[in-house]
């Protein structure tokens, strides 16, 4: 595989993870009433499942960036993907509100690595003249598509 193909494939993965990050935050919004019944809480309390993940989404990149600078981007990608996967499975098997809340927060903390170090990966992978094109065309499609799907 050519180097350009690998770089473009890496950008597609980054954009996809960014898409999944936003969909994970807002994806449960239509199911608040059902979640409230299953978790034995009010619908108002069930909405905190979204608010807490939004908070984790904001804090996560601040935590992941220094870790990725010290240990490298690839180990952070692997750990964050595996951690998010495990905590998402934990969300599927959570039958109490507290367990669901903890699993969603931790899954979002791991998933937010894509947002925190995605721009750094683009900066390191491409020359200065290519960055704007790659950032807008491929990396940010995850953000735009996620916003379109949630609206």
Image (cartoon, helix red, strand yellow):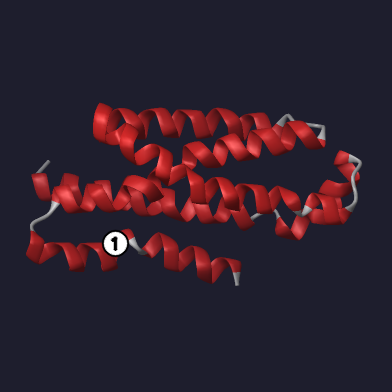
Residue 74 in the image: x percent, y percent? 27, 32
**Secondary structure under the numbered disc 1 in the rendered image:** helix
Residue at (11% x, 50% y) in the render: 4
Residue at (44% x, 34% y) in the render: 81
Residue 21 in the image: x percent, y percent? 50, 50
Judge left or right: residue 72 versus residue 101.
Answer: left
Residue 65 in the image: x percent, y percent? 33, 41
Residue 53 in the image: x percent, y percent? 61, 48
Where is the N terminus found, in terms of image quarters? Answer: top left
Image: 22 above or below 144: above
Tell me if I can see residue 72 in this picture: no
Image: 70 above or below 49: above
Dot 1, how many residues are within 10 Å of its Cα: few (below 14), some (14-19), or many (20+)?
A: some
Judge left or right: residue 54 versus residue 20.
Answer: right
* Occupied quadrant, residue 3: top left
Q: How many numbered markers are drawn? A: 1
Tell me if I can see residue 114 in this picture: yes
Image: 111 above or below 149: above
Residue at (32% x, 46% y) in the render: 117
Where is the C terminus found, in terms of image quarters? Answer: bottom right
Residue beneath disc 1: 138
Q: Nearer the viewer, residue 116 or 96?
A: 116
Judge left or right: residue 92 versus residue 95.
Answer: left
Image: 6 above or below 150: above
Judge left or right: residue 86 versus residue 76.
Answer: right
Residue at (21% x, 62% y) in the render: 134
* Occupied quadrant, residue 32: bottom right
């Amino acid at each position: 595989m050519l180097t350009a193909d690998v770089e473009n494939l890496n950008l597609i993965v980054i954009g996809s993870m960014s898409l999944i990050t936003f969909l994970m935050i807002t994806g449960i919004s239509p199911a608040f009433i059902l979640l409230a019944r299953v978790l034995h809480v009010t619908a108002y309390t069930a909405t905190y499942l979204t608010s807490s993940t939004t908070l984790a989404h904001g804090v996560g990149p601040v935590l992941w960036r220094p870790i990725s600078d010290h240990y490298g981007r690839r180990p952070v990608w692997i750990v964050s993907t595996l951690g998010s996967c495990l905590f998402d499975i934990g969300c599927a098997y959570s039958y109490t509100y507290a367990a669901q809340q903890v699993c969603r927060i931790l899954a979002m903390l791991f998933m937010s690595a894509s947002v925190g170090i995605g721009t750094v990966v683009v900066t390191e992978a491409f020359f200065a003249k290519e960055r704007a094109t790659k950032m807008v065309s491929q990396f940010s499609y995850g953000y735009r598509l996620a916003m379109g799907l949630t609206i």
